[in-house]
């Protein structure tokens, strides 16, 4: 299986990077082909330029390559911190430029764009790992956990990846080495369960 792994955190020493390494390692151990992108290391340009908006536009070569890659993915894993209840700007820009009409979703014939899109992603399973420095109860009661809505409903549910799993690890800033190792073990176990050696577990 082809699995796309997208990481968005600027610090190579961060726990997000440790999560991503664990994800990639487990996927490769299970025999999957991994397309890994560290958006900050790659200096991904998050700006959606005007000429890229039309569905039939001539996309930049690098954007086209990434679009083709995500279109062919059998599974997608996203790793990022919770910043203001949102993904980092570089990842939001990746969504804007890569999760695009004709690649991830389309509108039905006769729909001028105000209706409900139909998902086009080949990937039927999507996993999101987040980190936070807010305790879970406060995140849910005070903020309503906006990342759950963004990833489950606004992105993957809309684009057809309906087997969705998300895990928020917190509080990272005060966590012990033992806690972080337990979390990484959980990450590996989740990847093993959803993307096992013999295929996709939906």
Image (cartoon, rainbow, N blue to C red):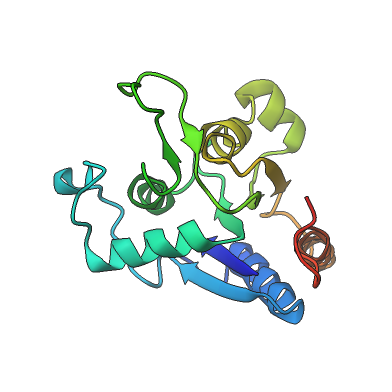
The answer to which quarter of the image holds residue 20 is bottom right
Residue 16's x, y, as percent?
60, 62
User: Relative to the observer, which residue lies in front, 28 or 108?
Assistant: 108
| Image position of 68 with respect to 47: above or below | below
The image shows a total of numbered marks equal to 0
User: Residue at image x 47%, y 59%?
Assistant: 70
Give the quarter of the figure containing the N terminus: bottom right
Residue 165's x, y, as percent?
72, 46
User: Relative to the observer, which residue lies in front, 202 or 185?
Assistant: 202
User: Residue at image x 25%, y 50%?
Assistant: 47
User: Residue at image x 35%, y 45%?
Assistant: 96
Q: Residue furthest top?
A: 114
The answer to which quarter of the image holds residue 17 is bottom right
Is residue 34 shown to the viewer in this render? yes
On the picture, is 5 further left or further right than 127?
Answer: left
Q: Residue furthest left?
A: 51
Residue 109's x, y, as percent?
36, 27
| Image position of 163 with respect to 42: above or below | above
User: Relative to the observer, which residue lies in front, 33 or 26?
Assistant: 33
Q: Residue furthest front?
A: 109
Is residue 9 shown to the viewer in this render? no
């Amino acid at each position: 299986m082809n699995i796309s792994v997208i990481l968005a955190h600027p610090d190579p020493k961060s726990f997000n990077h440790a999560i991503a390494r664990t994800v990639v390692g487990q996927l490769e151990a299970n025999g999957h082909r991994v397309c890994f992108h560290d958006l900050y290391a790659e200096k991904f340009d998050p700006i959606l330029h005007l000429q890229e908006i039309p569905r039939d536009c001539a996309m930049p070569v690098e954007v086209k390559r990434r679009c083709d890659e995500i279109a062919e993915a059998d599974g997608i894993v996203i790793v990022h911190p919770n910043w203001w209840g949102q993904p980092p700007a570089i990842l939001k820009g990746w969504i804007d430029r890569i999760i695009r009409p004709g690649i991830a979703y389309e509108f039905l014939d006769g729909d001028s764009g105000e209706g409900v899109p139909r998902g086009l992603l080949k990937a039927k399973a999507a996993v999101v790992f987040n980190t936070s420095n807010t305790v879970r109860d406060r995140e849910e009661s005070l903020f309503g956990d906006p990342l759950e809505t963004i990833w489950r409903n606004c992105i993957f549910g809309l684009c057809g990846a309906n087997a969705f799993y998300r895990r928020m690890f917190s509080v990272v800033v005060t966590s012990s080495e033992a806690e972080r190792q337990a979390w990484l073990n959980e990450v590996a176990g989740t990847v093993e369960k959803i993307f096992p050696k013999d295929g996709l577990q939906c």
